[in-house]
Amino acid sequence: MARIKRPPRWYFSLRSPYSWFAYRELGERYPDVLDAVEWIPYWDPDAETERLLDQDGVKLAYSQMTRAKNFYILQDTRRWSRARGWQMTWPADRDPDWDVAHLPYFPAAAAGLGRDYVAAAYRARWERGEDICDRATIARLAEEIGVDPDEMIAAIDDPVVRKQGAQCLAGAAADGLFGVPFFACGPEKFWGVERAAAFAAMVRGEPVTVVSDVPWQVGAAELAEPAGLGADAGHAGGCG
């Protein structure tokens, strides 16, 4: 029996500034690619989701960020956002529970509003600096996209949704993910926002002529182009 070919996919994290950059890059410069790929959330699991993963023998390839790397990312993301002309506000994370931020994606997606939830969460975190691991924030995001806030909050503790989240993370591990944003098209894998152009070309069936790029290497005229035309972006490694 012939194997069913998986669609191209991009793994995103609401935590990661580089995932937000990739979301902006794909949405503004390659919207057809963003429409064609499978959206898959990825996050650092809490104790309960970790327990579900352990039951299945799944180990995620992530590590805690060092202080030096954290300071580097602060500098690097400032360069990125300024080069692209994107307003960015760094949130203050205090004991974040990333399951709270990511598990609501699943009921939103089931209602056909997964992309709306991602957009709203990214705006809240990276444009307004809000705490998206706060359930009150999730309730406001639910109202923003037209989902019942109580149902959205209840989904965070729903065993079925928890299992769905664990299966999603297990699938990411099986796909070889070790950091975000992460893209896959057939057997080809791409890591980092600076690989968005190469990933887009492969999804479109075009030759990959740009392997890596960063926005400050793009000409001033191209940076001034309206959304939807050309180029890509970059990444600092890890989960960002």
Image (tube, helix red, strand yellow):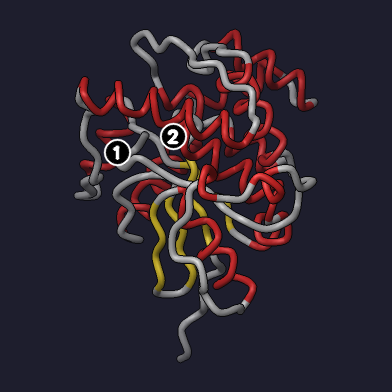
Q: Residues within 10 Å of mark 1 (few under 14, many from 20)?
A: some
| Numbered-mark total | 2
- Quadrant where the C terminus is found in the figure: top left
Q: Nearer the viewer, residue 43 or 15?
A: 15
Q: Secondary structure at mark 1?
A: helix
**With respect to residue 16, does 224 lie above or below?**
below
Any mark on residue 81, and which? none
The amino acid marked with disc number 1 is: Leu
Task: Say above or below: 188 vs 39.
Answer: below
Residue at 50% x, 66% y: name it. 210
Residue at numbered disc 2: 162
**Picture coordinates of residue 134 (x, y %)?**
51, 11
- Name the residue located 41 percent from the left edge and 49 percent from the top edge: 192
How crowded pointer 2 is (Cα within 10 Å; few <14, some 14-19, many 20+) is rated as some
Of mark 2 and mark 1, the one earlier in the sequence is: 1
Horizontal relation, residue 145 to residue 178: left or right: right
Give 86 or 187, whichever is nearer the viewer.
86
Where does the image place residue 212, in percent across and percent down from the top left? 44, 59
Task: Please state, as top left, top right, bottom left or bottom right, where the N terminus lies in the image.
Answer: bottom left
Q: Give the secondary structure at mark 2.
A: helix
59 left or right of 37? Answer: left
Mark 2: which amino acid? Arg
Q: Which x, y percent locates residue 235?
A: 40, 43
Residue beneath disc 1: 52
Residue furthest out toward the bottom: 1
Task: Report the Cα–Cα distance between label 2 and label 1.
Answer: 8 Å
Residue sitting at 30 percent across and 40 percent down?
238
